[in-house]
Image (tube, rainbow, N blue to C red):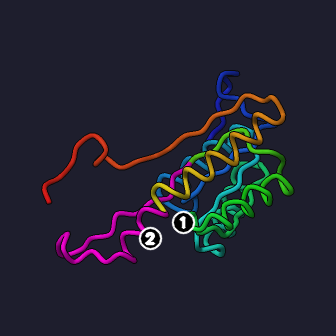
């Protein structure tokens, strides 16, 4: 990826944290941010995949990129993640809540409480917690920043059950 010359897209000195960042849309965002000068933390449950993606993006863009393990649905891991990003790269300026899941199941009646709790944890509770933690950091240092929450097309175009 080539870096843009437009100062509007210059992100040197900014720290970006992206959940679900080892592949797909998350990885593309990580590369775009890194190639515009940001220091980037990418996270998913698969730490090794994040570390590999981080190494590739860092080599391609010349930015500091780290891969971290994170299960977004577990609040205590969200707290550890925010602290680790701050320790390794600095406080987060941009949070991208990209991790999410919508598993297929045969019918609504077959959705167990455990599956429901897991989906809600990953898609709602975890992103909420990360927003709260990062926003508190931003407020504490009187800094401007951005929080981006990614959702599926189902948010605006639901499908039949």
Which image quarter: residue 48? bottom right
Residue nearest the viewer, comparing 111 with 17: 111
Between marks 2 and 1, how big is the CA–CA gap?
7 Å
Viewer-side residue, 71 vs 37: 71
Asked if the residue under mark 1 is in contact with the one under mark 2, i.e. CB atoms within 8 Å, the reply is yes
Residue on which disc 1 sits: 73
Quadrant of the rendering where the N terminus is positioned: top right
Q: Mark 2 points at which residue?
A: 118
Q: In this view, does 145 lie above or below 122?
A: above
Instruction: Provide the residue span drawn in magenta.
Output: 97-121
Residue drawn at x 21%, y 48% is: 158
Q: Indicate left or right for 141 with 161 as reference.
A: right
Please report whichever mark, 2 or 1, sits nearer to the chain's N-terminal start: 1
Residue 74, quarter of picture: bottom right
Counting from the top left corner in percent of width and height, residue 16 is at: 69, 45
Q: Which residue is drawn at 61% across and 72% down?
A: 49
Check the image and name the residue furthest to the left.
160
Q: Does the magenta stretch include residue 105?
A: yes
């Amino acid at each position: 990826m080539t870096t843009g010359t437009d100062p509007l897209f210059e992100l040197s000195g900014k720290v970006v944290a992206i959940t679900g960042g080892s592949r797909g849309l998350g990885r593309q965002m990580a590369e775009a941010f890194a190639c515009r000068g940001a220091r980037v933390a990418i996270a998913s449950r698969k730490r090794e995949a994040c570390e590999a993606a981080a190494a590739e993006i860092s080599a391609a863009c010349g930015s500091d990129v780290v891969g971290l393990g994170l299960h977004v649905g577990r609040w205590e891991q969200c707290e550890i993640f925010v602290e680790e990003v701050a320790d390794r790269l600095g406080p987060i300026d941009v949070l991208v809540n990209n991790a999410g899941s919508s598993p297929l199941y045969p019918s609504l009646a077959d959705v167990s409480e455990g599956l429901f709790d897991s989906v809600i944890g990953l898609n709602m509770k975890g992103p909420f917690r990360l927003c709260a933690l990062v926003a508190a950091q931003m407020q504490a240092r009187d800094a401007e920043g951005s929080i981006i929450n990614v959702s599926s097309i189902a948010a605006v175009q639901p499908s039949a059950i």
